Amino acid sequence: MARAEADGSGNQNWDSVEEIEDEEDSVAVLEAVGRQIKLWRQGAGLSQTAFGSAIGYSEAQVYKVEAGKRIPKPDFLEKADVVLEAGGKLAEFKRDVAEARYPRKLRHLTKLERESVEILIYGAVNIPGLLQSKEYATAMFAQARPALLRERFERLVEARLARQAVFDRRPMVTLSFVLEEVTLRRPIGGRGVLRGQLEHLIAVSERPNVELQVMPTDSEEHAGLGGELQVLRLADGKTLGYSEAQLTSRIITDPQEVHVLGVRYGILRSQAHGPARSREFIEKLLGDT
């Protein structure tokens, strides 16, 4: 089984050597891409202002991309390639940039999510990353202690939101979530952020490939007391597990352990409110918030 520092579904790890190495790995890629864009721009005789105007971005955004301080979006690279007549050389960086968006230890999980036909997630401590609104995700990372540098903070938020592309993947992936009631009441970021998050959950629950259930706090039976868990069923027939703790996370490949997680998740679903009742529960919470 593979082990890594936690920064997956919803938890964060703020202080480890591996975290620093992951950061350096991503920064090196972004700086290299930024240098290439700058060289092509200068070769075309364009200022940052003129180049930005030509591709629909501000001078400040161009500066940050060239300095490796901001991740260029696919649209940025595609337009830059056309304007600078790079013949596909800049657009080709889209894949490298997409990988650099995620900490190295999270790339394996993200790849598995893209290859899954079914993803089952139990969120015990907070709302899982795949379900977080931008404002909630931002508020979550703002809780980091020690505090994050601004550039890393922005990259982590963007990476978390980018993982949510799995909802729109084709062929469609089935996603099931069991959320603790307390995570829906905790006002991370303030009442306004919580309201937006609850509205986001209601909208996500309307998707045909998503089932969202709430585990009530007053339940006398609970199969998930061992903590958060995730089960991923892949297109090739394999089933893997993923779990997180305070400072560590791991991809679980042992069939017996994966089986245990699957059984626990199945029981959790039976103990939680059903999807329809859970939606009504969230709507009531929203009305009370």
Image (spheres, grey):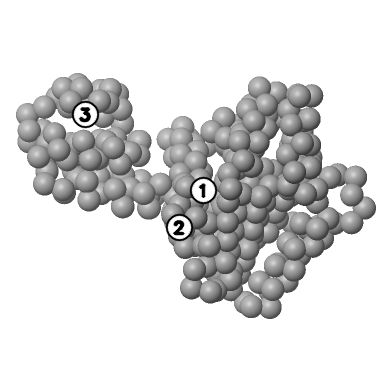
**Which one is earlier in the sequence, the residue at label 3 or at label 2?**
3
Q: Nearer the viewer, mark 3 or mark 2?
A: 2
x, y percentage for residue 3?
A: 56, 66
Query: Which residue is pictured at 64% across the width and 30% down the height?
Result: 199
Per the rendering, the mark at residue 252 is: none
Q: Nearer the viewer, mark 1 or mark 3?
A: 1
Could you say whether the residue bearing mark 2 is in a helix, strand or loop? loop
For label 1, the residue is 167
Proximity of marks 1 and 2: CB atoms separated by less than 8 Å: no
Residue 34 occupies which quadrant of the picture? top left
Per the model, the C-alpha gap separating discs 1 and 3 is: 29 Å
Q: Amino acid at mark 2?
A: Pro
Could you say whether the residue bearing mark 1 is in a helix, strand or loop? helix
Query: Which residue is pictured at 58% across the width and 44% down the height?
Result: 207
Q: Residues within 10 Å of mark 3 (few under 14, many from 20)?
A: some
Residue 221 occupies which quadrant of the picture? bottom right
Q: Quadrant of the C terminus?
A: top right
Q: Amino acid at mark 3?
A: Ile
Per the rendering, the mark at residue 55 is: 3
